Image: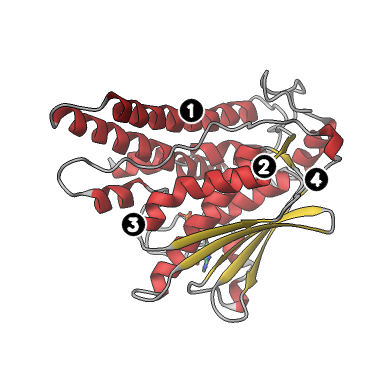
Amino acid sequence: MRWLSFLLVGVSSGVAFAAAIVPGFGRRRSHSGGPTESVQSSNHAREIAHLSPAPGMNELAGSIAHELNQPLTAITSNAQAAREYLASGPCDPAEVREILDDIVADASRASEIVRRVRALILGEAPSAIHFNVGEVVDQAIALVDANARARSVLVSREVADSLPRAVGDPMEIQLVLLNLLSNALDAVESVRPHGERSASILAQERNGMVVVSVRDNGCGVEPGQLERIFQPFYSSKHKGMGLGLSFSRALVERNGGRLSAIRNSNTGMTFELSLRTEDASQDLRGSVLPLAPRGIHPLHHGGKNDERNAANGMYRR
Ligand SMILES: Nc1ncnc2c1ncn2[C@@H]1O[C@H](COP(=O)(O)OP(=O)(O)OP(=O)(O)O)[C@@H](O)[C@H]1O
Ligand SMILES: [Mg+2]
């Protein structure tokens, strides 16, 4: 059961990864993306896709599993919560509706992941939307919130004023942020059983790029391992797949950006994600992502909130 959930979670990231990894993905067809996203599914995006490395099928399959796990686990947990709430006696319809809304949002995320995988297999170009980075940051934080709280990690964010819009596929960038936050939670938990556990996201403009930094005060990485951590299947964790960073880097590069790892001078790591920007006059307004669910709904009876939250975050530990 747990294995199945894990397998499923990886799908959303897997789509982008497929394009980034599998030769020929994203090249055969050239029509534009979905009707409302109406991006400029541009030649530029296709050119970027051509730059991507060629991963193996094991990496592709593993990455799909890696990314689908989070929405599927959240769906299961919220459905269980709704069932228990309904069995507990008179219910507030507004509360039930709220839980159902979150289930719908998570299902929508999962299907977006699958849609991208299909697009990759069909050779469609990646999206190139002008998107609000602060919005994507907030959605990623909302998605890890229950998991972070269950693990007593304080997650903060700072988005610079007047930050230009980035160009790329916001859902793929959201997946990257989820992977980086997931690693940050693991890293702080591993070395700080009782002390302050923190992870922060800072988004700012630098040299014409939007740079999103994910910083933690966790265990850090030895200097000699800095590039190794981006290799597929490298993991120092007991149950790690070692696919989060390799997949994330492939996604970022497919979107014309860069992903690098920096050791903090004091403790922990900072991962920097640099994204392209374009002329603000070409902005496409409005949200392009399915709304992030508000989180996992606490069980109304039984006092198992912590267990549930831990089970529902994007992390498997
Ligand atoms: N924030 C971090 N702090 C310390 N080490 C990190 C951090 N992020 C990644 N690492 C190191 O890089 C390795 C690879 O990370 P990656 O996300 O690719 O795989 P993983 O987290 O081990 O497994 P999974 O495939 O489930 O994500 C980790 O096992 C860990 O050793
Ligand atoms: Mg990871």
Secondary structure at numbered mark 4: loop
- The residue lying toward the viewer, choosing from 246 and 272, is 272
Earlier residue among tags 1 and 2: 2
Q: Is residue 130 left or right of residue 136?
A: right
- The residue lying toward the viewer, choosing from 159 and 188, is 159
Secondary structure at numbered mark 2: helix
Q: Name the residue under label 1.
A: 108
Q: Do the residues labelled 4 and 1 touch (CB within 8 Å)?
A: no
Which amino acid type is marked by label 4?
Thr
Residue at 65%, 24% in the rendered image: 122
Which amino acid type is marked by label 3?
Ala
Percent position of residue 186, x then y? 43, 63
Q: In which quarter of the image is residue 297?
A: top left
Secondary structure at numbered mark 3: helix
Q: Does the residue labelled 2 lie within 8 Å of ligand 1?
A: no
Residue at 52%, 44% in the rendered image: 63
Which amino acid type is marked by label 2?
Ala
Q: Mark 2 points at which residue?
A: 20
Q: In this view, does 54 lie above or below 224?
A: above
- The residue lying toward the viewer, choosing from 8 and 198, is 198
The numbered mark at residue 277 is 4
Q: Is residue 181 above or below residue 58?
A: below
Count numbered badges in the picture.
4
The numbered mark at residue 150 is 3
Earlier residue among tags 3 and 1: 1
Which of discs 1 and 2 lies nearer the camera? The answer is 1
